[in-house]
Image (cartoon, coloured by chain):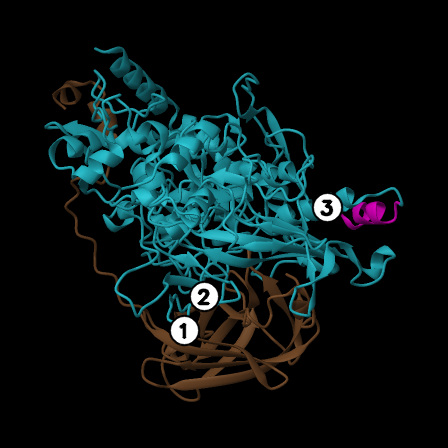
Chain colours: A cyan, B brown
């Protein structure tokens, strides 16, 4: 017996010993009302409801069987959230969930992070231990970059989480991890007042208030520690393990056979089933924000800009809390191609969960500062390299480059097969095999090793060429208005200040290249190009609407407009920030050589290609609060010096020597 | 696989799948009867309200409604609709026309199709997650948005069911920027 098999069997034995699923089922009290309810999990027998949900399975009345909502439910709910039936918690923010008795929380959602040790963790201890510190739960990578880019914190490390979290086995020597995180609540009225009435306060103090509000209020609904608003198609989901493993349909209503659950009433899972077959749509209940990969992967482009292409095809329904028409599926229905096609993996029937399994999603128990440190999957883990196809280890397993087992892959007959969550087998084509057997001369020039044993893939990530398009959001205007209140999704309460964001413009046909943390060149992306303006209110002793941060500047067309202040860090006056980013718009065909190299020796062509490497394109000029103009797609000055910082350690512009070599190439 | 079949763990593994191999055919589930309030008929009505989790609180005339900023861009008025006597059994879809009028001028017009979800308690059908947006070209700036605070506007909703039965409601509300 191999050590791996022995380990697996002993682990199984431990799990079975710990798992309560083999206890005899309790009486059938629950089934008296919930006749027809689906068996949630293969290991949990019908009638064992209380193993997960608690309550009294022997009781004969609903009141006695159910765990009743706490008497102070209305107080915990507060007045910021919409009207809801007594006991409804499925739009509660993390702070509100933390105030609930755990018995009630467990009754409503046994997968919540606060109770998962007693429920899912009985049989899945590793996952239950890891998931609460996963970046999908802490949201840690969301908070610190904005603070760091604005020089409001010193280091590139996580500083806040969506809920208080500690790693009991913390090892500070592991790069990119931290031991504990607290929450970021939006500053209270007293804190705002203290800053605004203090004559020693600076614009940086005001910027800190505004940034903390922005982070707590505008983007804090997408993590497993709390519920989303759960009031609109595309948003319905649960928390904790159930956020992914219990599926909600678009309307958030129950479609199963339980005779007791109400029909036509959100928010219920579509069926009372726990599943590993998590479709992309479930992931997209969160991933329509941030990098928007849940949209890009499906060929959906976010709108909301002041202009919309005249012949665009839109999604004509409310989605993700947006009005009909906010999302686009095709830029121009009068031509014969799709400018924003879905990722090829999506068109071939693969879901997010076909690639991202294990520690990519559950984490490892460490508190990572960003997803880049938690996720290790790269294209080569499935498709092999240009030199060598992917191949199993002696135990027959296929591993990532970091040595993580990819259980969805198997080697069979000299081929690599992926078993999809839909049960279908997908042939995973190997790059080395394609190059050896069917590659065109262009493909070989782009990817194969040359006589020096050098390949473009040594220097570039696969997605650099194989992303069909990149959506750049250019100029992110955020206003923080103290005259108004707004619900924040840390406390769930209505707190002072309204934060809202809007974008200036977008580009689909541009390309920027930078260096990824692994040292290779990758497509780069602006990182929340924030320009912030802050408006005062008389409640704080100022003049209503007086501009505390930002400037009123001519727009060049005879109008005076309010422009937000760019982030600043050190001597950088417009620290827009950039990140290398895998777009999830993979295409079979790669970009042409001219995307990154000159077609001729003309100055115009040189300027075009220099734009790819961050010298600016001149196409998207942003106006700052002092009237200064900044190129939204620029991160190098004409001499090649950085004009902005990059978010992640090890990332940055393409290295000067590589840049020079790439710019020297003139295609024939 | 052969090793697994010989393994003493087999009974334990098998016990994980208690339903496997069960040939018993469950009795057919009777079709639930559609309440009268969810069948197409007359008079058909539609109300505008707010709520979450199945709650419906009808808006009173000029009631405050929040102009909600959606995460990372976009904003609109989020409402819930309750219909009576419009077809709303499983699979039925309503055609909706939504208008937001400011001083008699349409500031946002949307047409969409949404399922009406019949509440089994007989109170009618709910159409959740309706966001009446505003034209981003006219209401994109902070100043334009703030001008809407405390503005009395009209929400006009027309719903048409699969048999062509229609209901319309016009409701004045007072916008509150925030939420």
Q: Which mark is residue A207?
A: 3
Q: Give whichever of A240, A587 is nearer the camera.
A: A587
- Residue at image point 44% right, 88% down: B43
Are the numbered discs 3 and 1 placed on the same chain, yes or no? no
* Image quadrant where one finds the C terminus of chain B: bottom right
Could you tell me if residue A161 is visible in this image? no
Question: Which of the 4 image quarters holds residue A452?
Answer: top left
Q: Assign the N terminus of chain B to one quadrant of the image.
A: top left
Residue located at (68% from left, 76% from top): B151
Q: Is residue A397 above or below residue A555?
A: above
Depicted B64 relative to depicted A273: above or below: below
Residues flagged by tags 3 and 2 on a common chain: yes
Cα–Cα gap, marks 3 and 2: 33 Å
Location of mark 2 (residue): A318
What residue range appears in magenta? Answer: A188-198
Using the image as rendered, state which of residue B63 and residue A460 is in the foreground: A460
Asked if the residues shown at circle 2 and circle 1 are in contact, with their CB atoms under 8 angstroms apart, the answer is: yes
Q: Secondary structure at mark 1?
A: strand
Residues at marks 3 and 1, CA–CA distance in whole angstroms: 40 Å
Label 1: few (<14), some (14–19) or many (≥20) C-alpha neighbours in 10 Å? some
Residue B141 image position (x, y, % from top left): 63, 65
According to the picture, the residue beneath numbered tag 1 turns out to be B112
Q: Is residue A192 magenta?
A: yes
């Amino acid at each position: 017996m191999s050590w791996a098999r022995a380990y697996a069997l002993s682990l199984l034995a431990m799990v079975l010993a710990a798992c309560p699923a083999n206890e005899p089922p309790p009486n059938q009290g629950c089934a008296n009302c919930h006749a027809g309810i689906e068996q949630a999990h293969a290991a949990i027998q019908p009638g064992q409801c209380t193993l997960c949900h608690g309550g009294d399975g022997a009781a004969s009345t609903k009141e006695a069987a159910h765990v009743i909502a706490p008497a102070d439910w209305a107080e915990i709910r507060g007045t910021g959230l919409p009207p809801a039936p007594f006991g409804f918690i499925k739009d509660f923010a993390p702070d509100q969930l933390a105030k609930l008795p755990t018995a009630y929380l467990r009754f409503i959602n046994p997968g919540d992070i606060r109770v998962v040790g007693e429920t899912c963790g009985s049989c899945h201890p590793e996952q239950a231990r890891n998931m609460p510190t996963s970046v999908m739960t802490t949201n840690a990578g969301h908070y610190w970059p904005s603070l760091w880019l604005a020089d409001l914190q010193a280091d590139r490390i996580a500083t806040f989480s969506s809920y208080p979290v500690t790693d009991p086995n913390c090892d500070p020597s592991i790069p990119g991890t931290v031991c504990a995180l607290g929450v970021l609540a939006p500053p209270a009225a007293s804190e705002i007042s203290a800053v605004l009435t203090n004559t020693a306060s600076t614009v940086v103090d005001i910027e800190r208030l505004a940034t903390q509000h922005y982070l707590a209020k505008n983007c804090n609904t997408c993590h497993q520690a709390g519920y989303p608003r759960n009031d609109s198609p595309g948003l319905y989901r649960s928390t904790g393990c159930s956020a992914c493993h219990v599926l909600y349909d678009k309307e958030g209503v129950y479609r199963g056979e339980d005779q007791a659950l109400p029909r036509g009433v959100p928010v219920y899972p579509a069926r009372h089933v726990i599943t590993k077959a998590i479709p992309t749509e479930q992931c997209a209940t969160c991933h329509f924000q941030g990098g928007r990969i849940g949209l890009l992967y499906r060929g959906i482009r976010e709108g909301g800009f002041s202009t919309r292409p005249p012949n665009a095809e839109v999604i004509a329904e409310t989605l993700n809390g947006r009005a009909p028409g906010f999302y686009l599926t095709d830029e121009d229905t009068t031509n014969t191609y799709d400018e924003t096609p879905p990722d090829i993996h999506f068109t071939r029937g693969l879901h997010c969960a076909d690639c991202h399994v294990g520690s990519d999603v559950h984490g490892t128990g460490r508190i990572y500062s960003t997803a880049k440190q938690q996720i290790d999957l790269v294209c080569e883990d499935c498709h092999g390299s240009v030199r060598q196809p992917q191949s199993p280890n002696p135990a027959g397993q296929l591993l990532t480059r970091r040595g993580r087992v990819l259980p969805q892959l198997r080697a069979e007959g000299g081929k690599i097969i992926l078993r999809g969550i839909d049960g279908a087998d997908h042939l995973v084509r190997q790059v080395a095999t394609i190059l050896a057997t069917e590659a065109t001369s262009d493909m070989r020039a782009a990817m194969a090793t040359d006589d020096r044993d050098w390949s473009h893939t040594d220097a570039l990530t696969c997605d650099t060429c194989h992303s069909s398009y990149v959506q750049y959001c250019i100029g992110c205007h955020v206003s923080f208005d103290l005259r108004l209140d707004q619900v924040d999704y840390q406390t769930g309460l209505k707190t002072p200040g309204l934060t809202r964001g809007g974008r200036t413009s977008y580009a689909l046909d541009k390309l920027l290249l930078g260096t990824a943390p692994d040292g290779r060149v990758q497509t780069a992306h602006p990182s929340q190009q924030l320009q912030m303006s802050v408006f005062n209110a008389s409640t704080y002793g100022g003049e209503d609407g007086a501009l505390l941060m930002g400037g009123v500047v001519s727009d060049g067309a005879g109008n005076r407009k309010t422009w937000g202040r760019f982030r600043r860090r050190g001597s950088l006056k417009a620290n827009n920030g950039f990140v290398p980013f895998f777009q999830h718009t993979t295409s079979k065909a790669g970009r042409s050589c001219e995307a990154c190299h000159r077609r001729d020796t003309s100055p115009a062509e040189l300027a075009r290609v220099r734009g790819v490497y961050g010298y600016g394109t001149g196409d998207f000029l942003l106006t700052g609060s002092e009237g200064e103009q900044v190129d939204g797609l620029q991160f190098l000055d004409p001499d090649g010096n950085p004009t902005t910082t990059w978010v992640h350690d090890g990332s940055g512009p393409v290295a000067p020597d590589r840049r020079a070599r790439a710019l020297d190439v003139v295609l024939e | 696989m052969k090793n697994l079949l010989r393994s003493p763990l087999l009974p334990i593994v098998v016990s994980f799948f208690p339903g496997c191999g069960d040939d018993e055919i469950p009795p057919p589930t009777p079709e639930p009867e559609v309440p009268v309030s969810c069948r197409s008929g007359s008079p058909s009505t539609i109300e505008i309200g707010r709520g979450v989790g199945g709650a419906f609180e009808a808006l009173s005339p000029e009631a405050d409604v929040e102009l909600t900023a959606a995460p990372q861009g976009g904003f609109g008025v989020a409402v819930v609709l309750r219909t009576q006597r419009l077809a709303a059994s499983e699979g039925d879809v309503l055609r909706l026309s939504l208008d937001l009028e400011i001083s008699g001028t349409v500031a946002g017009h949307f047409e969409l199709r949404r399922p009406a979800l019949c509440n089994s308690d007989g109170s009618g059908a709910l159409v959740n997650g309706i966001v009446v947006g505003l034209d981003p070209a006219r209401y994109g700036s902070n100043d334009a948005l703030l001008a809407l605070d405390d503005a009395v506007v009209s929400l006009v909703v027309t719903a048409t069911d699969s048999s062509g039965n229609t209901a319309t409601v016009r409701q004045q509300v007072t916008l509150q920027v925030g939420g």
